[in-house]
Image (tube, rainbow, N blue to C red):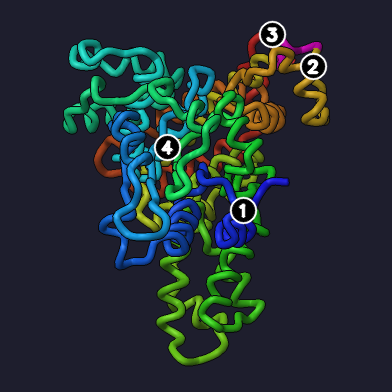
């Protein structure tokens, strides 16, 4: 049975837990979990001597092992915390790492994205000389296999170059003797805590940690659309409200859930603001939430592209209004719409040519995996389920329509970059044309290979 934090802490108190632990997943939950372990093992007044923190990307294993084998200055446990542990990466994880890098970059976590890029290059065997000579983002685009992310990759490269990273100081995933440590077990006085940004669960080392019950995965459950699940958000909000000894009206809870985004740190900050706002009052009302909690939920730009793929004009226009109101640049929104349209066009072309005999309307995801994705690798996106959803959305359009939409996108791009045009009107016109355009008009332009 996989351990949870409560069970692991209870076992720590009775000295029944392993003397090492790998924690990974959502960064906020990882941070809070590590703090709970630290609070239990090392009193605040002893942390100057009984706590050592290392960056696994740069610290040598000899340095870590020497500290591990040195008894603590004060009686009690000595905690060694290795952050950004690179020991669980693998070359097979390239796709996951590149996707995580772009996700961090899009979320504004530039430093995290840059460091993970250097980790990826280290895994790929890049030398410092190669990195120093790199001026064009093209090699990175090939590495990411993401031509539609060229602007993001170019900006990421410029950011990394401004930080003067040195690949010779990065420690590879193999540069350690952690496996030997598992055979011998850490000294009785020590506890080894490892945190990692990304973990390949297929590696032998990870499986050994799992067999010891020394892994805590703190990922967020997501629904079929990829959003953080309602249940995960309810648990997260409920725990923090309960810790403050407050009650939450059902309508107030629903409003918080509606305004919650993907970033739990932002949600935690909003809850803290809410608790300060209500003061000594025991119950949080919907009026309190509406007055204090910022709306991060409906601003997801991918809700807009999903509505476009479903030809839902009303929802798409509503999402556009929210995005513009929260300050999203019109050209960024247009770029996202263009990326979605290219994916739909690629899926529709496959449906009408190479996969015409394999793709069936209404087929289940399992059938899609077995018949369409025979090799298991996605064809359009980086995720098999995202491919399945993209194929479903593509069915709502003809090839002629999608080609026409690409022309409309070019026209909208020209209008946005020209003076005298209102961005909102340009984008609204584009959305209405994509959602409500007559199919017959599109069919007249359809190539002979169409359905």
Q: Nearer the viewer, mark 2 or mark 4?
A: 2
Badge 3 is on which residue?
449
Secondary structure of the residue carrying numbered label 2: helix
First of labels 3, 1 by sequence position: 1
Earlier in the chain: of badge 3 and badge 2, it is 2
Can residue 439 be seen here?
Answer: no
In the rendering, which numbered label is found on residue 334? 4
The quadrant holding residue 282 is: bottom right
**Is residue 410 shown left or right of residue 234?**
left
Coordinates of residue 265 in the picture (x, y in percent)? 43, 58
Q: Is residue 377 above or below residue 165?
A: above
Question: Magenta part of the protein: which range?
Answer: 351-357
Secondary structure under tag 1 reads loop
320, 192: nearer the viewer: 192
Crowding at mark 2 (Cα within 10 Å: few <14, some 14-19, many 20+): some
Mark 2 / mark 4, whichever is N-terminal:
4
> Where is residue 245 shown, x and y percent of the image?
55, 83
N-terminal label among 2 and 1: 1
Tell which of 130 and 209 is nearer to you: 209
Q: Of label 3 and label 4, which has the lower sequence position?
A: 4
Q: Nearer the viewer, mark 3 or mark 2?
A: 2
Q: Which residue is mark 1?
A: 16
- Residue at the spot of label 2: 371
- Label 3 and label 2: CA atoms lie apart by 22 Å
């Amino acid at each position: 049975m996989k351990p949870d934090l409560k069970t692991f802490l209870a076992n720590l108190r009775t000295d029944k837990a392993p003397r090492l632990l790998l924690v990974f997943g959502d960064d906020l939950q990882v941070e809070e979990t590590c703090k709970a372990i630290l609070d239990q093992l090392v009193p605040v007044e002893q942390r100057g001597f009984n706590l050592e923190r290392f960056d696994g990307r740069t610290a040598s294993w000899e340095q870590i092992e020497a500290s591990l084998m040195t008894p603590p200055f004060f009686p009690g446990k000595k905690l060694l915390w290795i952050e950004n542990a690179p020991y669980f990466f693998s070359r097979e994880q390239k796709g996951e790492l590149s996707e995580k890098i772009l996700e961090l970059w899009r979320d504004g976590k530039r430093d995290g994205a840059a460091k993970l890029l250097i980790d990826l290059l280290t895994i790929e065997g890049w030398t410092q000389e190669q990195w120093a000579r790199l001026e064009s983002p093209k090699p990175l685009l090939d590495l990411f296999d993401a031509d539609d992310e060229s602007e993001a990759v170019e900006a990421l490269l410029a950011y990394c170059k401004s930080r003067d990273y040195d690949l010779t100081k990065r420690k590879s995933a193999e540069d350690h003797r952690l496996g030997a440590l598992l055979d011998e077990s850490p000294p009785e006085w020590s506890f080894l805590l490892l945190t990692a940004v990304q973990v390949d669960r297929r590696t032998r080392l990870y499986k050994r940690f799992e067999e010891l019950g020394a892994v805590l995965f703190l990922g967020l459950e997501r629904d079929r659309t990829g959003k953080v699940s309602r249940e995960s958000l309810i648990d997260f909000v409920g725990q923090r409200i309960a810790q403050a000894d407050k009650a939450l009206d059902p309508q107030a809870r629903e409003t918080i859930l509606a305004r919650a985004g993907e970033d739990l740190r932002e949600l935690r900050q909003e809850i803290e603001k809410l608790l300060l706002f209500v003061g000594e009052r025991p119950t949080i009302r919907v009026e309190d939430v509406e007055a204090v909690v910022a709306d991060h939920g409906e601003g997801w730009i991918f809700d807009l592209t999903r509505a476009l793929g479903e030809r839902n004009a009303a929802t798409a226009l509503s999402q556009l209004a929210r995005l513009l109101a929260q300050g999203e640049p019109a050209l960024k929104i247009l770029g996202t719409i263009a990326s979605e349209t290219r994916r739909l066009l690629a899926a529709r072309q496959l449906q009408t040519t190479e996969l015409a005999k394999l793709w069936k309307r209404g087929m289940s995801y399992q059938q899609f995996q077995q018949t369409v994705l025979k090799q298991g690798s996605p064809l359009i996106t980086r995720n098999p389920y995202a491919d399945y959803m993209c194929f479903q959305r593509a069915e709502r359009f003809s090839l002629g329509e999608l080609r026409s939409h690409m022309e409309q996108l070019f026209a909208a791009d020209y209008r946005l970059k020209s003076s005298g045009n209102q961005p909102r009107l340009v984008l609204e016109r584009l959305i209405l044309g994509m959602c409500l355009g007559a199919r017959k008009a599109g069919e007249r332009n359809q190539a002979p290979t169409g359905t």
